[in-house]
Amino acid sequence: MYKCYQDNIVSGCESFPLSWVIGENLLYLAMWTLTGYLLWPIWMPLGLPLLSIIWVILVVIIQILLKKHNCSGCYYYGKLCHLGWGKIAAAMFKPDSGNPKTGIKLAFFYILPPPLISLTALAFAIIRSPTWVYWLMLGVFVILNAVSFPVRKKGCGLCAMREACPGSAAKKVTA
Ligand code: SF4
């Protein structure tokens, strides 16, 4: 585990239920898939959905880097955290093989794209009047993102890393 985390580990869930792990991963997969769908018609040079292709490449690269820079130094490395990614990290990278500072920067992947995608898709929908399916998918995307906040907060609340992790949604506020 990264040294910067060691003194702040608190008691938490040692291994999350598989149903939780699968459910939360499906939630993220749904949001990433919907992002690809919403970006698809926005920019299509030579008939290629270039933004969707870039998005897929970005998701794959960022997810691999996150496993290295965040998960390899996490308390849950080799264990079943709420996303199960500690197990994936252990299968891919040596312990503490990343850089926590890079990991923090990579975590912006969860913060910046959702509002950017929502606003871009909304502007596209208003200007180009796509089919009702596009509007429906945009609505589902916004709802899933809203749902992800309480889900994340619940996961962080049970996580042994909640006081150590810079991205924790369940840190105690100290005066
Ligand atoms: S709790 Fe977060 S940082 Fe730790 S292994 Fe799971 S996903 Fe990775």
Image (cartoon, rainbow, N blue to C red):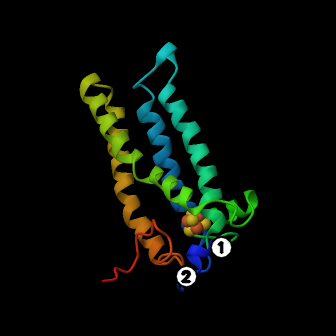
The residue under the point 51% across, 37% down is: 55
In this rendering, the answer to whether 58 lies above or below 17 is above
Q: Which residue is mark 2?
A: 9
- Quick check: 29 left or right of 69? left
**Amino acid type, residue under disc 1 in the picture:** Met
Q: Are marks 1 and 2 in contact (CB under 8 Å)?
A: yes
Q: Quadrant of the C terminus?
A: bottom left
Give the quarter of the image for residue 71: bottom right
The reply to whether residue 82 is in sight is no
Indicate yes or no: mark 2 CB to ligand 1 under 8 Å: no
The reply to whether residue 105 is in sight is yes
**Amino acid type, residue under disc 2 in the picture:** Ile
Name the spot of residue 9 as percent of width and height, x first. 55, 82
Label 2 residue SS? loop
| Badge count | 2
In the picture as drawn, the residue positioned furthest to the top comes out as 46
Question: Mark number for residue 123?
Answer: none
The residue under the point 59% across, 50% down is: 63
Name the spot of residue 144 as percent of width and height, x first. 39, 53
User: Mark 1, residues whose alpha carbon is within 10 Å: few (<14), some, or many (≥20)?
Assistant: some
Name the spot of residue 20 as percent of width and height, x first. 54, 68
In the picture as drawn, the residue positioned furthest to the bottom comes out as 11
Q: Which residue is mark 1?
A: 1
User: Mark 2, residues whose alpha carbon is within 10 Å: few (<14), some, or many (≥20)?
Assistant: some
In this rendering, the answer to whether 47 lies above or below 104 is above
Name the spot of residue 42 as percent of width and height, x first. 39, 26
Q: Quadrant of the N terminus?
A: bottom right
Quadrant holding ligand 1? Answer: bottom right
In this rendering, the answer to whether 136 lies above or below 2 is above
In this rendering, the answer to whether 150 lies above or below 109 is below
**Viewer-closest of 18 and 114:** 114
